[in-house]
Image: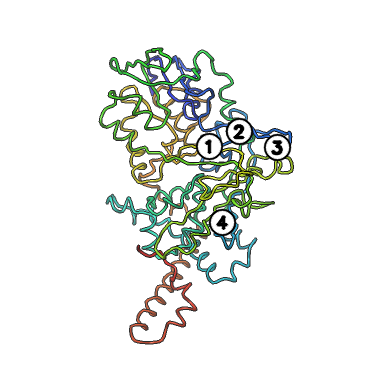
Amino acid sequence: MPLPPTERVAIVGGGCTGTTCFWALQHSAHDVHLFEASANLGGRIKSLPLEHHGKEVDVNTESPCFNVDASPNLVSLLRFLGISTSAVPFSFGVSNGADTYDWHGGVWNTLLLHPWALCSLGNLRWLLDIIWFNYLAVDILTDKHHSHDKANVQLSTYEFLSKEGYSKRLCDQYLAPLLSTLWGTNVGRLLPQFPVKTVIRSLCDHQLFGARRTAPCFRRIDGGASHVVQTMTEGFAPENVHLSTSVWKVVRIGKRQYTLFTEDGRESHFGHVIFAVGNDEIVKILGSNIDTEEAEIISGLKTANNIAILHSDPFLAPNLYGPGPTSNYILDPTDHDCPAAWTPRRSCLTYDVNSLQDIPAYLFDRLYITLNPFTPPHPRFAHSIWEYSDPELSTATLQAQSRLPLIQDKRGLSYGFRWTGRGFLEDAVSSGLEIAIEHLGAQVPFEVHYHPDPMGPSKPLLLELGLKDHLVRTALYLARVYVLVLQISWILLGMLGFPVSRVETMFGWMLGGDKMSKP
């Protein structure tokens, strides 16, 4: 790839994406300047000081955990920066007000630790649904299910689960908690309308399908996510980093020539501008200089506002104690008697800060971060509250992500932020690296992987399955056929007047009594 000519480059936004992009470009031939409205780099990655009985500790607002298989660029960056990581188990808890469940990486591990789960017929149906889903749902990504028909590409999770006859409990107490833990947000309220192909592709990326030979490898950044930003910025030239400098307008003055105006009245000229801020801010800064296609795509990269609270209230962490799960998905107990149709229950997600950030509980009490709590913690236990944004979970956002390459680097403008992916630290790092390398010819000391289009065609995952996977899948298909035959037989017997209601009550767990039904 030929190197682009030397340019003056402006990066608007000093979050993780902007900081990573500047890090990759700092030794290039370009004259690069980073503009950040706040007094510190890192964006939403911050450290909150906490004092308890005269002792102080910094609590990171961003989860330091990541999946190694799904985060190749973050792993390479951490290795180059010399930042150590520690292994953490992938586990989460689910509480519905009456019962709690701990999930330890897979069905078999969970059953080994909680064999009494098999004593309940309801639990047995739930576990069978999970097994069926984990082995068979991947078929929707294969060629026989692949279609360019718009309706098929945008098939929602609710439509897929309803069509396949899965139970509602699979959503409430497995998929929603699992995805919330992986994505670091409350997925339950938006999961029904989210494209099922994107859900399944994400689970594949995290190695959570099929008969895995090894468990998914999750690790924790020692020192927290803020340590990554601090380490990257150590060698930054201070004259090129403009903190507390808000950009309020960018005006095009010629072909690939722009004037950047800051709130303090200064004007600067640049040949390339990189926007690493939210979509609304981009539209506001460009104003009339944005063209129709840019406005349409950027406006589609929507974000959702979230509330996070640092606290010590055990009510919002019913089973986060001792050596247990590192996160807990809590369903509102007052929402327990919901209709049979897929009406999402109110819920929230709580992280165990002590385990994830290695903060001793005996020195600083139990510490939790709860996202979007349906009820606030007791004021006596609340330590801090903040607001942040994440990519909105919607088909419209995914479509805008797919179209983003159409406007990248077309007029000397580049766009990068967490909304180029699901919002992971990996997405922010990858976005900054890709712009620096592909648009401005930067060279970094490791190989960079580019993540696929979230709505693009998938690789044939079935070709990667082993003999064990195919044997299990065959057995599960036969089991589903058997259940289907029973269901048809029960319907026919009922039509002929046979008294099947008592037997149906006994075996309703197997015959689909809690299926995802249409509203």
Q: How many labels does the image show?
A: 4
Residue 479, percent from left and from top: 46, 70
Q: Mark 4 points at which residue?
A: 94
Quadrant of the frame with the C terminus:
bottom left
- Of labels 4 and 1, earlier in sequence is 4
Please provide percent x and percent y for residue 514.
Answer: 44, 68
Residue 77 appears in which quarter of the rendering? top right
Residue 244 vs residue 24, the one in the foreground: 244
Q: How crowded is mark 3: few (under 14 residues within 10 Å), some or many (20 or more)?
A: few
Indicate which disc, 4 or 3, sits on the residue closer to the N terminus.
3
Alpha carbon of mark 2 to alpha carbon of mark 4: how far? Answer: 27 Å
* Tag 4: amino acid: Val
Residue 452 coordinates in the image, percent (x, y):
40, 40
Q: Mark 1 points at which residue?
A: 386
Question: Which of the marked residues, 2 or 1, is nearer the chain's N terminus?
Answer: 2
Out of 206 and 374, give the one closest to the viewer. Answer: 374
Q: Is mark 1 on a helix, strand or loop?
A: strand
Q: Residue at x 54, y 52 (%)?
A: 329
- Mark sitting earlier along the chain (2/4): 2
Element at label 4: strand
SS state under label 3: strand
Residue drawn 43% across and 67% down? 477
Q: Up-down: is 458 above or below 467?
A: above
Residue tagged 3? 52
